[in-house]
Image (spheres, rainbow, N blue to C red):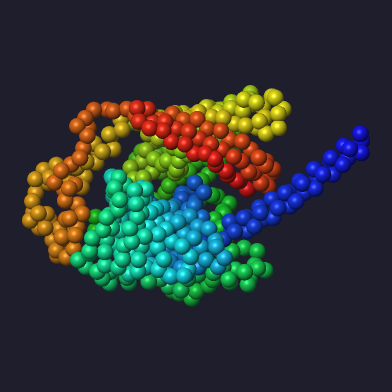
C-alpha cells in the first residue's frame, strides 16, 4: 500500500515538475518583455497627458511608452510617437484619445492602436510588422502606407484617407480595400464605403511635422546585443536643449514621490507663459492624494495670480483622494478616475470621468468593502456626484470557500449592475456644439462659403460635403431627447483560478450581460494571466 502511494506521488511530481518549470520560464520571458518600452514621444506641443498603469502624468519630449499606455491630447496640442522597431510613426492631433497595445513577433511588433476619438496621421514602413488602428466603428489594417484616420466624438463615425499604399478597412458588416487617393467611411451599421479624394497629396506641412529626429529607443536587435545592461535605456543623441524640453528618463517611471513633471509654453489672452505641470501623488499612511499643479510663469518671472487667488483655486489643485487599495477591507476614492473596470469588463471597462479634463473636472466617488466571510465584497461607483446620473454597483463572493473542494473552493462569482438615469444627457448638452439646428436649412452653396471661411479655400469641399450632407441637413435626434430616459445593464461573471502562485496566476473566466429591454452578450471561454 505504501509503495503504491509512493509511486503515485512520484508520478504526480513527474507531471507537476515540467509544468512548474514551464510556468517559471514563461513568467521570466514575459517579465523580460514587459520592461521594454515600445515607443517614444519624439515631439509634442501643448497639453499632452499619458495614462500609464492607471497613473496620469504630463508627457514630455522623450517620454517612453509601454504596452497599454494611453495618450490624451487636449485643445491645440499634438504628440508625435515613434515605434522602437522603426516600423511606424504616428501623429496624434488635438482632442484625441489613443491607446497603444503591442506584442513582439521575432524582430518586429504587432501594433494595435485604439482611437476612441480624434484624429491620427500614420506613416507605416512595409515589412516592419502588422499595424492596426481600431475605432468604435471599424478596423484599419495597414502594411506600408501613409494615411489619416478621424473619429467623430459624438457618433464614432470613422473617416479614413489613404495617401500612399493600401489599407484594409473593415467592420462587422464587411471589409473593403482603400487604395491611395481614396477615402473610406464607416458608421458601424453598414459595410464601409469609399470615394475618390479631390486632393490626393498629403499636405506638406503635415509631412514636415511628422518627420522625427533619429530614434532614441533601442531596436529589438540592439537590446539583444546589449544584454549586459540591466535596465532599458535610451540611446543618446546630441541635440540642443530648449526651454520646453525635459531630460529624457533613463528607466521606467519611478520616483521617491510618485508623479511627473512637464515643462512647456502656452499663450493665454496674448501673453506667453512658461508652463510647469506637476502631478505628484503624496502618500500619507493609507491615504494617497493626487495633485495637479499647473504653474504659469510670465516673462518677468511672476506667477499668474488668477490661478492662485482664492480657496477654490487651491482646492481645484487636488485631482483625487484615495484610501487603501481596491481589494482591502475598506477602500474609497474621490475625484478623478482615469480607468474603472467592473468584473471582466463586459459592462464597464476603462471608463473614465476625465475625457474633458482639465477643462471640465468631475467629482467621482467609489467605495468598496471586502470581507473574509465567503469572500463577500461590495463596490459602488458614481463618476459624477454633482449630476448623479450614472451609477455602477457590484457584489462578489466565493460561495464554495468552506467546502475544501479543489478548484471550486476558489471559484469567485459576481454580479454587476449599471444604470444611466439620463442616457440622452450627453447628446442634449452637445447637439448644437458643432452644427446649430438652424444650420440644417443651409443649402450646398451656404456650406461651401462656410467651408471656404474655415479652410481658406474650397479644396476638398465636394468630398467633405458628400460624406456629411445627411448630418448637415437633418439631425437624427430622438423625438424624446428632452426627456430623461433611463437605461440599465445587468450581468453576472465568474473567475476560476487554475494556477495561483506569487509569481504566476492563471485563471479561466466567463461573463454575461443584458441591456434591459434590448439585447444580451457574453464572453466565454476566457483565460487570463497575472504576473
In x, y percent, where is residue 104?
A: 55, 61
Residue at 40% from the left image edge and 35% from the top image edge: 383
Residue situated furthest right in the rendering: 2
Pick the residue in front: 145 or 364: 145
Kindly tell me whether residue 61 is visible in this rendering.
Answer: no
358 left or right of 433 in image: right
Up/down of 233 relative to 399, above or below? below
Q: Is residue 237 visible?
A: yes
- Give the residue at x 84% y 41%: 9
Query: Which of the 4 quarters of the picture holds residue 372?
Result: top right
- The residue that appears at 22% across and 64% down in the rendered structure is 197
**Quick one: 299 or 102, which is closer to the camera?**
102
Residue farthest along the bottom direction in this orientation: 238
The residue lying toward the viewer, choosing from 164 and 56, is 164
Whole-percent x, y for residue 508 in the image: 59, 40
Q: How many marks?
A: 0
**202 or 527, nearer to the observer:** 527
481 to the left or right of 18: left
Rendering coords of residue 229 (x, y %): 65, 67
Amino acid at each position: 500500500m505504501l509503495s503504491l502511494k509512493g509511486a503515485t506521488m512520484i508520478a504526480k511530481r513527474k507531471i507537476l515538475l515540467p509544468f512548474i518549470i514551464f510556468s517559471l520560464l514563461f513568467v521570466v520571458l514575459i517579465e523580460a518583455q514587459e520592461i521594454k518600452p515600445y515607443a517614444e514621444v519624439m515631439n509634442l506641443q501643448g497639453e499632452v497627458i499619458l495614462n500609464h498603469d492607471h497613473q496620469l502624468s504630463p508627457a514630455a519630449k522623450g517620454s517612453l511608452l509601454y504596452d497599454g499606455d494611453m495618450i490624451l491630447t487636449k485643445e491645440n496640442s499634438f504628440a508625435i510617437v515613434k515605434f522602437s522597431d522603426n516600423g511606424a510613426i504616428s501623429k496624434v492631433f488635438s482632442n484625441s484619445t489613443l491607446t497603444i497595445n503591442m506584442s513582439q513577433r521575432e524582430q518586429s511588433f504587432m501594433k494595435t492602436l485604439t482611437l476612441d476619438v480624434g484624429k491620427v496621421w500614420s506613416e507605416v514602413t512595409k515589412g516592419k510588422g502588422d499595424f492596426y488602428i481600431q475605432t468604435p466603428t471599424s478596423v484599419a489594417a495597414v502594411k506600408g502606407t501613409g494615411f489619416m484616420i478621424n473619429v467623430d466624438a459624438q457618433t464614432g463615425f470613422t473617416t479614413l484617407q489613404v495617401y500612399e499604399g493600401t489599407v484594409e478597412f473593415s467592420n462587422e458588416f464587411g471589409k473593403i480595400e482603400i487604395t491611395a487617393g481614396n477615402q473610406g467611411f464607416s458608421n458601424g451599421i453598414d459595410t464601409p464605403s469609399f470615394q475618390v479624394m479631390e486632393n490626393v497629396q498629403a499636405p506638406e506641412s503635415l509631412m514636415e511635422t511628422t518627420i522625427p529626429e533619429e530614434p532614441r529607443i533601442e531596436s529589438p536587435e540592439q537590446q539583444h546585443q546589449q544584454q549586459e545592461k540591466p535596465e532599458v535605456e535610451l540611446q543618446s543623441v546630441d541635440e540642443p536643449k530648449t526651454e520646453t524640453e525635459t531630460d529624457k528618463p533613463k528607466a521606467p517611471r519611478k520616483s521617491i514621490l510618485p508623479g511627473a513633471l512637464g515643462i512647456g509654453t502656452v499663450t493665454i489672452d496674448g501673453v506667453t507663459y512658461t508652463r510647469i505641470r506637476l502631478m505628484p501623488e503624496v502618500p500619507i499612511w493609507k491615504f494617497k492624494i493626487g495633485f495637479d499643479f499647473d504653474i504659469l510663469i510670465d516673462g518677468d518671472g511672476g506667477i499668474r495670480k488668477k490661478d492662485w487667488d482664492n480657496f477654490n483655486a487651491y482646492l481645484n489643485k487636488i485631482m483625487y483622494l484615495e484610501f487603501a487599495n481596491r481589494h482591502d477591507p475598506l477602500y474609497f476614492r474621490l475625484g478623478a478616475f482615469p480607468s474603472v473596470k467592473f468584473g471582466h469588463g463586459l459592462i464597464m471597462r476603462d471608463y473614465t470621468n476625465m475625457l474633458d479634463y482639465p477643462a471640465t473636472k468631475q467629482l467621482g466617488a467609489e467605495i468598496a468593502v471586502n470581507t473574509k466571510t465567503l469572500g463577500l465584497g461590495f463596490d459602488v461607483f458614481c463618476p459624477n456626484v454633482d449630476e448623479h446620473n450614472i451609477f455602477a454597483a457590484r457584489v462578489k463572493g466565493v460561495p464554495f470557500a468552506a467546502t475544501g473542494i479543489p478548484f471550486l473552493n476558489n471559484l469567485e462569482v459576481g454580479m454587476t449592475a449599471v444604470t444611466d438615469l439620463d442616457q440622452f444627457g450627453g447628446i442634449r448638452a452637445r447637439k448644437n456644439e458643432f452644427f446649430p439646428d438652424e444650420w440644417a436649412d443651409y443649402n450646398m452653396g451656404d456650406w461651401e462659403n462656410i467651408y471656404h471661411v474655415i479652410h481658406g479655400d474650397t479644396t476638398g469641399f465636394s468630398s467633405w460635403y458628400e460624406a456629411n450632407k445627411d448630418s448637415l441637413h437633418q439631425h437624427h435626434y430622438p423625438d424624446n431627447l428632452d426627456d430623461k430616459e433611463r437605461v440599465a445593464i445587468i450581468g453576472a461573471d465568474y473567475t476560476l483560478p487554475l494556477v495561483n502562485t506569487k509569481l504566476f496566476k492563471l485563471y479561466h473566466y466567463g461573463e454575461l450581460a443584458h441591456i434591459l429591454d434590448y439585447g444580451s452578450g457574453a464572453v466565454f471561454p476566457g483565460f487570463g494571466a497575472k504576473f
